[in-house]
Amino acid sequence: MARKTKEDAEKTKRRIMDAALDVFYRQGLTRSTLNDIAAEAGVTRGAIYWHFKDKMDLLKKINESINEEVILFLKRPGVEEIDRLNDITGIISQFFVLLETNDRFAKFYAIMSYKVEYTDELEALLAVEFRSSKRFRAFLESTYEKLMGEGKVTRRVSPRQASLSIFSMIGGMVEMWLLDHASIELGTEGVAILMELIKGFEISPEG
């Protein structure tokens, strides 16, 4: 019986998080209330307080859940052993597929990009996102530097410049898609555009 109660509690917690994600997405974080979330989830405010301290704690737990999904989806063996810059396209295409197929992830990304006011309360959560962004840029830069040493990419641009151009291209396409899903098909058009950008950095075996 205790096991069943624990399972039910976890289901309720997940239902509250999913409801909060929908409410935040529709109304924005500031205009959303715990009453709105309780109504959406079909629970009482007391049930929300049983699992979460407040609205910001709810957003934090959603963020942790989303990050776990992203890590599981994108984690592939050998990522640190990239032999060609174009291999990065495969990693990014997985991210694009995740955005287009995982509604929870897409909504959370939109919330953090356009539906929150950047207050002191959000500082810790935003710091996590900034660190993640910085790590990815560092990964791109170190990968380019490694391949440059192997003579596989051009020296006309620095590893930092290459990293910034790739990162900016990805961010721009994601922003277009978040604002209007019909503006670009990330899994096809987005990947093709990224491949063309990266192709300009690579040196052919013959050259």
Image (cartoon, rainbow, N blue to C red):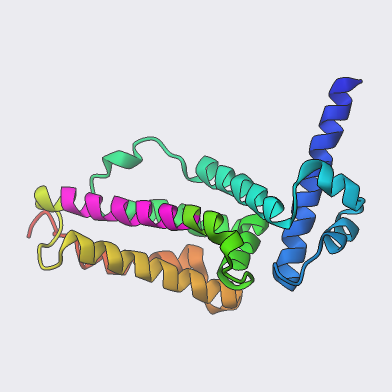
Give the tally of numbered discs. 0
**Span colored in magenta:** 129-146
**Magenta stretch encompasses residue 101:** no
Which image quadrant: the C terminus? bottom left
Residue 13 percent coordinates (x, y)? 79, 43
Q: Residue 60 or 76: which is nearer the viewer?
A: 60
Q: Residue 70 or 65: which is nearer the viewer?
A: 65
Q: In this view, does 114 lie above or below 121?
A: below
Residue located at (21% from left, 54% from top): 144
Residue 68 percent coordinates (x, y)? 57, 42
Q: Is residue 112 above or below residue 4?
A: below
Q: In this view, does 73 lie to the left or right of 166?
A: right
Of all residues, the one furthest to the front in this rendering is 120
Query: Can residue 28 be seen here?
Result: yes
Image quadrant assignment for residue 99: bottom right
**Secondary structure mainly formed by the magenta segment:** helix
Query: Can residue 109 be seen here?
Result: no
Residue located at (81% from left, 64% from top): 33
Q: Residue 124 or 160: which is nearer the viewer?
A: 124
Q: Residue 25 or 86: which is nearer the viewer?
A: 25
Which image quadrant: the N terminus? top right
Q: Is residue 21 above or below residue 179?
A: above
Q: In this view, does 89 lie to the left or right of 113?
A: left
Residue 105 percent coordinates (x, y)? 61, 56
**Magenta stretch encompasses residue 137:** yes
Residue located at (63% from left, 45% from top): 65
